[in-house]
Image (spheres, rainbow, N blue to C red):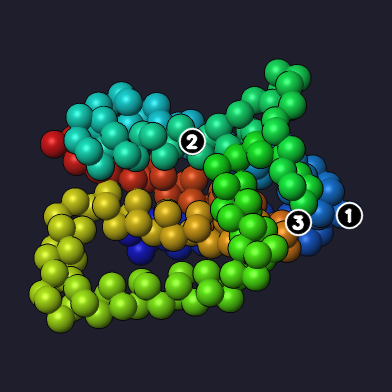
Amino acid sequence: MRHELAVYTVAGLAVLMLAIVSVDFRHGPFFREDGIVEMTAALLFLAALLVGLHRQLFRTWIGFLFCSLALLACLSEISFGARHIGFSMPAMQGGGELDGVQDLVMIAYRTAAAKGFLPLVIGLVIILPVVTGLLAYRSGHLSRIALWFMADRGRPTLAVALLVIGLAVILDVMEALRFAEETLELFGAALFVTAALRLNRS
C-alpha cells in the first residue's frame, strides 16, 4: 500500500507540474471541463467498474456498493454524457448545472448558506464524526471496526479513495483550486482501480 501511494503521489505531482508549466492551467487542456485530467479520471473509474464486474465483486454488499460508486463517479466525471450527447442538465440556483453527484452537496451548501444555517452545518460535520469516534472507542466498537477493515486489503484502499474524493468535493463546493480538485479526483480514481483489484470476492 505504501509503495502504491508513493506512485500515486508522484503521478499527482507530475500532473500539477504539467499544470504549472502550461500557459493557462485553469482553462488549458489539462483542467478544463472534459479536459485531459477529468477524462483520465473517468476512464479510471470505468476501469474500476469493469474490473469489479469481471471479478463479480457485486456478490457482496461492499462489492455492490463499490461498483455502484464507481459507476456514479464515472458518470459524474462526464456529466452523465450531457456534453457528449448534446442535452442539457437541470440548472442549479446560484449558477451551474446539476451534472454530477457532487452537485447535490453544492445545492445543500448553497441552501444552508442562504438560510443562515451554514455555521451549524459545518459544526455538525466536524463534531459528529469526532463524537461518533469517541463513542465507538469507549464502547469497544472501534477495535472491531479496525479489525473489519484490516480483514480485507481492499477496504482500507476504498476508504482512502473516498476520503480523497470527499476532499475534492469540498474544493468543488468552495469553487476554488480547480487544478487541485481535478488532481484529487484522478488520485481517487487510481485508488478505486487498486481497490477493485484488492477487494475480496466473498
Question: Is there CB contact under 8 Å for labels 3 and 1?
Answer: no
Residue count near mark 3 (Cα–Cα under 10 Å), binned few <14, some 14–19, many ≥20: some
Looking at the image, residue 23 sits to the left or right of residue 186; the answer is right
Mark-to-mark CA distance, 2 and 1: 32 Å
Q: Which residue is mark 1?
A: 23
Disc 3 versus disc 2: nearer the observer? 2
Residue 34 location, x and y as percent? 72, 36
Q: Relative to 141, say whether 188 is above or below.
A: above
Mark before the other along the chain sequence, 2 or 1 = 1
Q: Which residue is mark 3?
A: 19
Looking at the image, residue 173 sits to the left or right of residue 59; the answer is right
Question: In the image, what residue occupies the spot 32% across and 26% down?
Answer: 53
Q: Relative to 169, say whether 119 is above or below.
A: below
Q: Which residue is mark 2?
A: 72
Question: Is there CB contact under 8 Å for labels 3 and 2?
Answer: no
> What's under tag 2, amino acid-wise?
Leu
Mark before the other along the chain sequence, 3 or 2 = 3
> What's under tag 1, amino acid-wise?
Val
Question: In the image, what residue occupies the spot 10% across and 75% down?
Answer: 140
Residue at the extreme right = 23
Residue count near mark 2 (Cα–Cα under 10 Å), binned few <14, some 14–19, many ≥20: some
- Where, by quadrant of the figure, is residue 197 drawn? top left
Q: Secondary structure at mark 1?
A: loop
Mark-to-mark CA distance, 3 and 1: 8 Å
Residue count near mark 1 (Cα–Cα under 10 Å), binned few <14, some 14–19, many ≥20: few
Q: Secondary structure at mark 3?
A: helix
